[in-house]
Image (cartoon, rainbow, N blue to C red):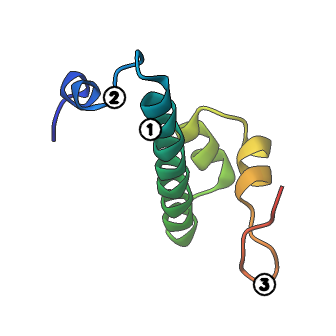
């Protein structure tokens, strides 16, 4: 895996706001997908909301509110 400096060098320059901000949006969406998938895996493996929250650096309540599943098994919408 490449280090952070190498990855940053591959991103658009902040001097090109259109490209840079578009990349920010894409990275946030990717991070959200990774977070959701990882939380699903953690819950399937028996992790508690407290363990998930600690890993994310947020409170248990915040993690649960953002990622709880409805009774149908789908994510609750904020």
The quadrant of the picture occupied by the C terminus is bottom right
Which residue is under mark 1? 23
Asked if residue 46 shows in the view, the reply is: no
* Residue 12: mark in rendering: 2
Q: Where in the figure is residue 19, as x and y percent of width and height?
A: 43, 33
Dividing the picture into quarters, in which one does residue 2 lie? top left
- Up the image or down, 46 lies above or below 19; here it is below
Judging from the image, what secondary structure is the residue with disc 1 in? helix
Residue position marked by numbered label 3 in the rendering: 72
Q: Is residue 59 left or right of residue 15?
A: right
The location of residue 67, given as percent across then percent down, is: 70, 57
Camera-side mark, 3 or 2: 2
Pick the front one: 64 or 34:
34
Q: Visible in this render: residue 72?
A: yes
- Return the disc, 3 or 1, that comes first in the chain's sequence: 1
Rendering quarter of residue 8: top left
Residues at marks 2 and 1 touching, judged by CB atoms closer than 8 Å? yes
Q: Residue at x 23, y 31 (%)?
A: 10
Q: Is residue 27 above or below residue 14?
A: below
Identify which residue, 21 or 76, lies in the foreground: 21
- For the N terminus, the image quarter is top left
Q: Secondary structure at mark 3?
A: loop
């Amino acid at each position: 895996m490449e280090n952070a400096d190498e990855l940053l060098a591959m991103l658009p320059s902040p001097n090109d706001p259109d490209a840079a901000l578009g990349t920010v949006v894409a990275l946030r969406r990717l991070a959200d997908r990774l977070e959701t998938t990882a939380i699903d895996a953690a819950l399937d493996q028996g992790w508690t909301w407290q363990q998930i929250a600690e890993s994310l650096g947020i409170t248990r309540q915040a993690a649960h509110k953002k990622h709880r599943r409805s009774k149908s098994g789908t994510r609750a919408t904020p």
